Image (cartoon, rainbow, N blue to C red):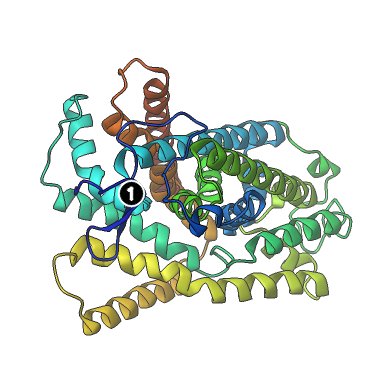
Amino acid sequence: MEEPAAVGSLNRGEPGWWYLSAPEEPEEDGAPLLSLPPGPRSSSGASFGFSVFNLMNAIMGSGILGLAYAMAKTGIIGFSVLLLIVAILASYSVFLLLTMCIHTAMSSYLFIIKSELPSAIAGFLSGDHSGSWYLDGRLLLLTTSICVVFPLALLPKIGFLGYTSSLSFFFMVYFALVIVIKKWSIPCPLPLNLAVSNSTRECKPALFNFSKESAYAIPVMAFSFLCHTSVLPIYCELQSPSKSRMQKVANTGIGLSFLVYFISALFGYLTFYDHVDSELLQGYSRYLPHDTIIMTVKVSILCAVVLTVPLIHFPARKAVVMVLFSHLPFSLIRHISITLILNAIVVLLAMYVPDIRQFFGVVGSTSSTCLLFIYPGLFYLKISTEDFVSQHKLGACALLVFGLLVGLVSLALIIYNWIHQ
C-alpha cells in the first residue's frame, strides 16, 4: 500500500480509490480523525443531525421485512436480547473501523478489505500477530469476494429487498407506523378460512421460542444493521470530523434504528403471532388484500427500490472490476458487459428463488456477518500496534470469534433445513 502524503491531503492510489491522509499515531478521541487544511472546507460539511440521518438511511432497509419472523422464531425476550447484542456489536465494530481509518488513511471499507484481507487471513491462520503477514492472495481475495462482496451488492435488489434510497428513513418509519396501526385491523384468532387453526392459544405471545428456524434470526439482524460500507464516506462529509464525534453519530443512528426495528417487529409479531410470513407484507396481502394504506406501503417501498438500483449496482460492478480487472485499463465493452451480467443474475434470482428468508439467511450469515463482525475484528488485530492483551484487541478478538461462530453455525443450520425440507 502506498504511504499517504502530507496530513490533510487527498491521494490517488489505484484508479477509483482515494486515500485520506492521517497522522502516523492515533489521536485522542476528541481530536480530528483526519486533519483538514485550514480554509472554507474545514468549516463546511454535514451537521451532526444530518449525518445521523444519512447513516440511518444506510442502516434501515429491507431487513425490516424479516424481523417479525425472527421474533416469532425466538420469542419477544429472546429477540430483544439478540437484537440488542447485534446493535451493540455493530456500534463497536464501527469504533474499530474508525480506528483502522487512522492507521490506514483509507476512506473506503471495500478498499481496506482488498488491501488487508489476504495477509490478515494468512496471519490469523498461522498464529502470527506480529503485523508482518504476507500472502499472494489474489485467489483468496477472489473467492472471498464472490462469497461476500457479490451477495452484499447484488441480493438487496431482489423483489422487495434493497436499501430505500435517500428517503429510506421516512419509508421505514412510515412502514413501522402502519404496522402499529394495522395491529387492530386483523383479528386474532385469524379468520377460519385463511388460518390453519382458530385456537385462542395462538394469540398468546411467546417470550422464548427456539427451534431450527431460529437459525435465521441473527443473520436477519446482521443484515438489518449493516451500514459499515457507508461509515467512512459519511465521516468524510461530517462537520468538524473527529473519532468521538463520528462514534456519537454511529451510536445515535444505530440506537434510533434499533427502536424502529423493534417496534415494527413487535407489532408485526403481535398481529400474526406464529403465522408471521418470512416477508411481513405478504401477511397483510393475504388478510387485507384491498387495504389502501398497505398498498401505499408497497408502492413506496417498490419505488424506493427502483430508484436505488443504480446506487446498489455501482459498488457491485466496482467490486468485480477491483477483483478481476484492476490491472487493466478501462474498457467500455467490459463495463457494459459486467452491467448486463450482474442485472441478469439479479433478475434470474428474483424469478426462481421463492422465499425471501433464504436471502436473509444466506446473505446475513455470510456477507453481513463478515462485514459486521469478522472483518473489523480481523483487520484490527492485524493493523493495530497495541499489545495483544490490550482491551480493544481482546474486544476485536471476541468480535471475530462471535462472527465466525454465528456465521458458520447459522449457515450450517440453514443448509440443514434445506436438506430436510
Disc 1 residue crowd, few under 14, some 14–19, many 20+, Cα 10 Å: many
| Frontmost residue, 146 versus 393 | 393
Place residue 173 in its image quadrant.
bottom right
Q: Is residue 271 above or below residue 156?
A: above
Residue 329 at x, y = what percent? 16, 74
Q: Residue furthest front?
A: 39
Please state which of residues 276 and 419 is positioned toward the viewer in this rendering.
276
Residue sitting at x 39%, y 70%: 314
Mark 1 sits on what residue? 106
Instruction: Please report the residue visible at 21 percent of the width from the left and 46 percent of the height from the top.
Output: 3
Q: Helix, strand or loop at disc 1?
A: loop
Left or right: where 1 falls relative to 238: left
Q: Which residue, as the protein is rendered here, is positioned at the far left?
A: 136
Residue at left 25%, top 48%?
4
Residue 421 visible to the viewer: no
- Residue 307, by quadrant, is bottom right
Task: Tell me residue 229's x, y (percent).
Answer: 43, 53
Three-letter amino acid code at the position of disc 1:
Met
Classify residue 61 by image quadrant.
bottom right
Look at the picture and state if 87 lies above or below 386: below
Residue 244: x %, y % from top left: 54, 35
